[in-house]
Amino acid sequence: DAGVIQSPRHEVTEMGQEVTLRCKPISGHDYLFWYRQTMMRGLELLIYFNNNVPIDDSGMPEDRFSAKMPNASFSTLKIQPSEPRDSAVYFCASSARTGGNEKLFFGSGTQLSVL
Amino acid sequence: GESVGLHLPTLSVQEGDNSIINCAYSNSASDYFIWYKQESGKGPQFIIDIRSNMDKRQGQRVTVLLNKTVKHLSLQIAATQPGDSAVYFCAENGTGRRALTFGSGTRLQVQP
C-alpha cells in the first residue's frame, strides 16, 4: 500500500489567494482526518470524516476553511482567501475501524507558506 | 479541560543509553493512548499504542507504560540509536471520540 498521499508537498502563495490541499487516504480506511501543525500550537485537529461524511469540524478555524470528501478515495481542504497566519504544515491521516483500533496513518504533509 | 502535555521539550541522550519520554494527560475518560515519532519533513509515524486496561506494552526496543492513577504515560526506548533522533508525540483518544488529541512533543537528540 502506498500509504496516505498528499499533494502538493509545498505550496507558496500570496495573501488573498485560494489554496487547495489534496489527500488520498489508504484504500479501505473509512475515517479521514485533517490536522494542522505549527510551532506555537502543535498538531491540531481541523476536521474528520467517516464514510465521506463530516463528523466533527469544530477545529476548523473560520469560514475561510472548508473541507470536502466527494468519495472514499479523495478529500480536499480549501482555504479562501488565504492569510499569512495560515502558514503551517497540513497533514491528512486515515484510519480503519478494526477492533476499535484508532491508530491513524499520516501522509507526508503539505507545507503551506502564505506571503 | 482535555489536554495532553509533555514535560520535557528536549531530551539529549548518548547512543546506546536508554531513553524515557514522559507525557501527562488530563482526560480521565481517555481509554486509548499512542506514541508517534516525527522526523524532520515527514508525517508522524506510529510507534506503539496501549489501551487503558493495560499498564505496560512492549514492542521492538520500545515499551509504553501507563499509570492511570496519576494520568501519566511514558515511552522507553532501549539502546537508543542515532536513527531514533526525532520529535516524539503522545496522543490520546477518549471514549467515543475517534480523533486523537496530541501533546506538544519532545525532541530526542541522540549523541554519537
Image (tube, grey):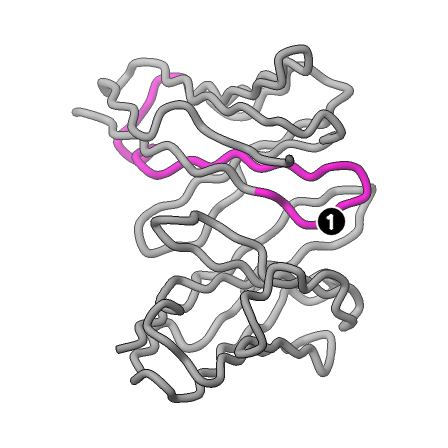
- Mark 1: few/some/many CA within 10 Å (<14, 14-19, 20+): many
Q: Position of residue A111 (x, y in %)?
A: 35, 67
Q: Is residue A33 left or right of residue B10?
A: right
The span shown in magenta is: B78-101
| Dot 1: element | loop
Q: Measuring 58% from the left and 77% from the top, which residue is drawn there?
A: A63
Q: Measuring 44% from the left and 38% from the top, which residue is drawn there?
A: B104
Whether the magenta-drawn stretch holds residue A34 is answered as no
- Label 1 marks which chain's residue? B
Residue A111 visible (yes or no): no
Closest to the observer: A50 or A101? A50
Q: Measuring 54% from the left and 41% from the top, which residue is drawn there?
A: B102
Residue B28 against residue A28 in the figure, above or below: above
Q: Measuring 60% from the left and 77% from the top, which residue is drawn there?
A: A66
Tag 1 residue: B98
Specify the quadrant of the image occupied by residue B85. Answer: top left
Closest to the observer: A21 or B27? B27
Q: Residue furthest left?
A: B112
Q: Position of residue B6 (x, y in %)?
A: 45, 28
Q: Position of residue A22 (x, y in %)?
A: 52, 77
Residue A78 against residue B94 in the figure, above or below: below
Q: Is residue B93 left or right of residue B59?
A: right
Quadrant in the picture for the N terminus of chain B: top right
Q: Is residue B52 left or right of residue A43?
A: right
Amino acid marked by disc 1 = Arg
Residue A63 against residue B55 in the figure, above or below: below
Quadrant in the picture for the C terminus of chain B: top left
Closest to the observer: B76 or B61? B76
